Amino acid sequence: MRRSGADDKILSYNDVVLRRSDLDILSGPYFLNDRIIEFYLSYLSSSYPANDILLVPPSIAFWIMNCPAVESLEDFLEPLHLPDKKLVIFPVNDNDDVSKAEAGSHWSLLAFERNANTFVHHDSNRGINKWHAKRLYNAVVGFMSVCNSASDASYLECTDSPQQVNGYDCGLYVTSIARAICSWHGSGEAKDKDELWFSAVKEEVTPSTVAGMRGEILSLIRGLMATK
């Protein structure tokens, strides 16, 4: 009988395939990879199925940031229907080498809110991904509206975003902040376009809740595996 290996597929969820090595990452104090972040964003998309929300997979966000030709990017983005979205969340990675998959060392989050016509960058490590977030913003801002009004969308660096207390939890901050923003958007309460989701993020994203996120995602995956 063949022994199970790190590359064994353990779960197919929407378009995401998880492998046994992903469980090991979640079980220990390790940097989250693209697959785990894509899985959780896909799970959030299923939990908040409104047509006006888009959570962009890491590979798509990376390609947008590094696409060499505007014409190719326009064709690539068309199926995402960005002008129809009120909330778009992009994971940002600091990988500069387009020839290497999953090569970066830090995650952050860039979110677009249409009513405020603003992109907000949340970075859990003192804004070290700001340059990468601005590259993504510059690449995508002109495609957010059919009439190009969103091409004037502003960029905001959230300077008081919750900060990680170690060198490996940045991906968990991305998943936690994404969840808080989606919950804020789906709450049905009146939205302040100046305050946005900042209070919700401060309240819901703390070192203790982020630390618990590993176990939450791990339990979620195991629960889904049990139902397959």
Image: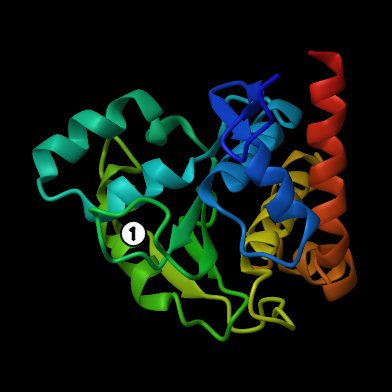
Q: Nearer the viewer, residue 208 or 134?
A: 208
Q: Quadrant of the N terminus?
A: top right
Which is more toward the observer, 124 or 49? Answer: 124
The image shows residue 144 at horizontal and vertical percentages of 35, 43
Residue found 44% across the figure and 62% down from its top:
93
Q: Quadrant of residue 147?
A: top left
In percent of the image, x 72 and y 31: which residue is there? 48
Estimate how packed mark 1 is, as few (under 14), some (14 to 19) or many (20 or more) residues with alpha carbons within 10 Å: many
Q: Residue at x 23, y 54 (%)?
A: 66
In which image quadrant can residue 152 be found?
A: bottom left
Using the image, determine if residue 53 lies above or below residue 208. above
Asked if residue 65 is positioned above or below residue 71 in the image, the reply reads below
176 relative to 54, above or below: below
Find disc 1 in the rendering and name its residue: 136
Q: Quadrant of residue 71?
A: top left
Residue 26 in the image: x percent, y percent? Answer: 74, 53
Q: Residue shown at 33%/40% (left/top)?
A: 145
Q: Residue 29 appears at what percent x and percent y?
A: 74, 67
* Residue found at the far top of this picture: 228
Quadrant for the C terminus in the image:
top right
